[in-house]
Image (tube, rainbow, N blue to C red):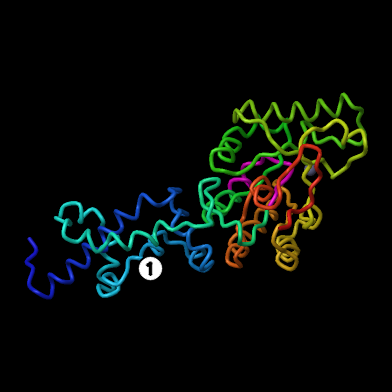
């Protein structure tokens, strides 16, 4: 058993207070594993916190004076909230109460895709075409999810059945799946019925796995004419940063093409099929996050930057 003399007792009480705060604060979080919510709420104040990422950090900062007095010992207590449950924390709860407010203060933040977004802060949509392709796509998603990021994957319909697990992961983890046609045909070379077929079958291939039909279309090669536009009744998503990753297959060049140009509201074009593109993505994702960009899906970007229409063609979304 622990004997409490005056000094130890005071310290122990502070530890309990900190631990109790953890428990009280926990439900305010938007659970999303290690890349979790508490760091989301710090986006507004500090992108550095988000990059280093410990969910406890924000709660720690807001636990108030008692915790500051407890210093490092309190940090240890936070890691063992179970202890507090076994102890009578009743007397400590009162001072915790008023401090709850800052922890719950998510003013201006919007829950989306399993984390919080701040519409007032910069956003970028990374888009990856021509997949699915699990060896690269899963690396990209690993990095995104570690950084509270999401992306849009414009997939080719006839590849979807070969990568069902990857497609399900995209869908389940808040990424967006867009339609890049069924066979990656250049639609400006097709007639109306063929164009419609490419789009419909692309939508159906994804819906067969996820239960959800893609909202957005990306044209292979960006190729369009009046027949194409007349026969697609979904928003067409172009891009304003073309990394040319498919051409250079050089991660460093791909990284530079983004970091040297990126602005709020941009749509970045990359491809899922190449290892070098995956290498570039897993470097870009933490780098952009560190710079304060929220990595969002195209639909999220549209939601916070003016919306979408079914006959619209979009290159970027500005405030
Ligand atoms: Zn393509």
Q: Which residue is mark 1?
A: 61
In the shown orientation, is residue 171 left or right of residue 280? left
Residue drawn at x 59%, y 65% is 292
In the shown orientation, is residue 42 left or right of residue 188? left
Assess whether residue 38 is covered by the magenta stretch: no
Placement of the C terminus among the 4 image quadrants: bottom right
Name the spot of residue 110 as percent of width and height, x first.
Answer: 54, 51
Determine whether 280 is above or below 127 in the image.
Answer: below
Q: Which residues are magenta?
A: 126-138
Count of numbered circles in the view? 1
In the shown orientation, is residue 6 left or right of residue 193? left
Secondary structure, mark 1, is helix
Determine whether 104 is above or below 5 in the image.
Answer: above
Placement of the N terminus among the 4 image quadrants: bottom left
Determine whether 141 is above or below 1 in the image.
Answer: above
Q: Residues within 10 Å of mark 1 (few under 14, many from 20)?
A: few
Name the spot of residue 44 as percent of width and height, x first.
Answer: 53, 64
Residue 7 vs residue 146, the one in the foreground: 7
Q: Quadrant of residue 221?
A: top right
For ligand 1, the image quadrant comes to top right
Residue drawn at x 60%, y 32% is 164
Residue 223 vs residue 215, the one in the foreground: 215
Residue drawn at x 26%, y 56% is 81
Residue drawn at x 72%, y 32% is 157
Name the spot of residue 234 as percent of width and height, x first.
Answer: 76, 35
Name the spot of residue 197 as percent of width and height, x first.
Answer: 81, 25
Residue 6 vs residue 144, the one in the foreground: 6
């Amino acid at each position: 058993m622990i004997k409490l003399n005056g000094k130890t007792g005071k310290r122990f009480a502070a530890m309990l207070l900190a631990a109790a705060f953890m428990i009280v604060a926990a439900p305010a979080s938007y659970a999303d594993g290690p890349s979790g919510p508490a760091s989301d709420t710090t986006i507004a104040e500090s992108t550095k916190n988000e990059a280093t990422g410990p969910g406890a950090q924000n709660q720690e900062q807001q636990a108030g004076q008692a915790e500051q007095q407890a210093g490092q010992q309190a940090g240890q207590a936070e890691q063992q909230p179970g202890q507090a449950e076994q102890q009578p924390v009743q007397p400590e709860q009162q001072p915790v109460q008023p401090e709850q407010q800052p922890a719950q203060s998510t003013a201006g933040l919007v829950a989306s895709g399993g984390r919080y977004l701040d519409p007032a802060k910069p956003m970028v949509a990374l888009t990856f075409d021509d997949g699915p392709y699990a060896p690269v796509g899963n690396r990209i998603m690993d990095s995104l999810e570690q950084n509270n990021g999401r992306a849009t994957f414009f997939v080719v319909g006839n590849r979807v059945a070969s990568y069902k697990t990857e497609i399900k992961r995209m869908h389940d983890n808040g990424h967006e799946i867009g339609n890049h046609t069924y066979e990656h045909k250049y639609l400006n070379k097709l007639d109306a019925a063929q164009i419609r077929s490419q789009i419909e079958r692309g939508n159906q291939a994804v819906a067969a796995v996820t239960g959800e039909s893609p909202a957005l279309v990306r044209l292979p090669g960006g190729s369009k004419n009046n027949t194409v536009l007349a026969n697609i009744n979904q928003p067409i998503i172009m891009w304003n940063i073309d990394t040319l990753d498919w051409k250079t297959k050089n991660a460093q060049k791909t990284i530079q093409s983004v970091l040297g140009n990126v602005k709020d509201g941009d749509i970045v074009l990359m491809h899922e099929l190449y290892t070098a593109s995956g290498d570039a993505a897993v470097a870009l994702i933490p780098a952009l996050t560190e710079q304060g960009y929220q990595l969002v899906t195209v639909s999220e970007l549209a939601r916070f930057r003016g919306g979408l229409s079914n006959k619209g063609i979009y290159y970027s979304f500005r405030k």
